[in-house]
Amino acid sequence: MTDLSDLTLVIPAYNRPAYLGRQIDYWAGSGVQLCILDGSKNSADPEFIAGMGPDVHYEYMPIGFNERLVHASKIVKTKYVALLGDDELYVKQGLRDCLDLLDADQRLIGCVGRSLFFFHREGEIYGHQVYGKSQDIPEMYGEHLARLRNSFPQGDPSGAPYLLYGIFRKEQWCAMFSTAYSRHYSSGYVYELALLIIGACLGPTKMVDSLVWLRSGENPAMSSAAVNRKIGTGEWGTSSEFASEYEDFVRRLTEELTRRGVTPPESIEQAVRDVAEQFFAYSLHKPHRPIAYWHRVLYFAARNTPRWAKTLLKRNMNKTLGTVLDYKGVAFSDALVQLRDNGVEFNSEEMKELSEFLLAFHSTLES
């Protein structure tokens, strides 16, 4: 069995002490090293910190999300590294499959597994697959800039591995995150674009058909000055208001990739501009698709419908109505059946234990 002690999970925690406790309980005894950088308003209780165990590195850092990720890139020491939200989870067998792949293929800088969105409602866990379109890009072992362009066909990166929650070799993870998050931008989505571009250039990342990432819908998405979700990437990249930021973005990525051996600089800069500008056009077009207008109608209705009415509707929703309303959540066990039908691998016993673990957590949380 693969030794998970070769892996550090960087967790930028923020004001969710119960979920932070869940992380520590979940990983206890696995060998995984946790690097918890806590930006909460208050530090965790000293007694809680003292009981975290030898595999947990905890720092109270009431500073921005960006600064904590850059700090993580300076202190992690294990062979492999991955980012993890404080309320999200990785499946342990999926992690082992990723590490086995990386150990076997030294050409790879990272790998990305399959993903399941999950949430809790009325004593049950629900879920559905996300990022299902992700796949290996064409000629993934080829030339750096060709791999970059192949990751963004017509500016759309959704068919490539989702690198933000990939498992990477330490050197490449640190280069990606320290560069992507080393300055603040007016749009919080720019950091991920930088990370996708850098990661594609540094080396090949492969998909594994194992369930690895459990993306949580248990809490609202965080928004702050560092992660401003009000300005889209397309608006940011095409507005004269942010032109100086964009030029800095191109310059910093070009310099870092040149330093990492991707040459010549002129070709790198042009490739970064080409990919970024295609992505801006894709991002501007995306909200104007008919399905996007329908999603906004659904969002408005959801915001203005009383909770009791939404609960009643969800209890009595059939598959046809769920499809019309874009409601994808099904019982956790049914979501796993759908995953397996889509070719996703997982350990059934582990998933049963995980479901029980999540239910027990929410039962305790509510009481």
Image: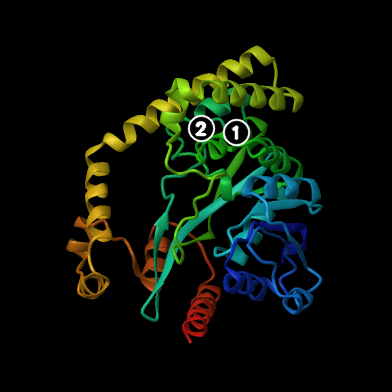
Mark 2, residue position: 151
Disc 2 secondary structure class: loop
Say above or below: 342 vs 360.
above
- The quarter of the picture where residue 58 lies is bottom right
Tell me residue 89's x, y (percent). 57, 64
Say above or below: 5 vs 207.
below
Single out the residue that lies furthest toward the top.
266
- The quarter of the picture where residue 281 lies is top left
Instruction: Please indicate whether residue 359 sits to the left or right of residue 293 in the image.
Output: right
| C-alpha separation, residue under disc 1 versus residue under disc 2 | 7 Å
Tell me residue 70's x, y (percent). 71, 44
Disc 1 secondary structure class: helix
Q: Residue at x 75, y 48 (%)?
A: 71
Residue type of the residue flagged with mark 1: Ala
How many residues crowd around disc 2 within 10 Å: few (fewer than 14), some, or many (20 or more)?
many
Mark 1, residue position: 200
Say above or below: 324 vs 308.
above
- The quarter of the picture where residue 95 lies is bottom right
Instruction: Please indicate whether residue 273 sits to the left or right of residue 124 in the image.
Output: right
Mark on residue 215?
none
Residue type of the residue flagged with mark 2: Ser
Q: Compare residues 204 and 341 and report the one nearer the observer.
A: 204
Q: Compare residues 42 and 251 and report the one nearer the observer.
A: 42
Q: Residue at x 63, y 30 (%)?
A: 201
Q: Are the residues at dot 1 and dot 2 in contact (C-beta closer than 8 Å)?
A: yes
Instruction: Please indicate whether residue 219 sits to the left or right of residue 142 in the image.
Output: left
Single out the residue that lies furthest toward the bottom.
367
Say above or below: 81 vs 89.
above
How many residues crowd around disc 1 within 10 Å: few (fewer than 14), some, or many (20 or more)?
many
Instruction: Please indicate whether residue 268 sits to the left or right of residue 324 in the image.
Output: right
Q: Compare residues 309 and 53 and report the one nearer the observer.
A: 309
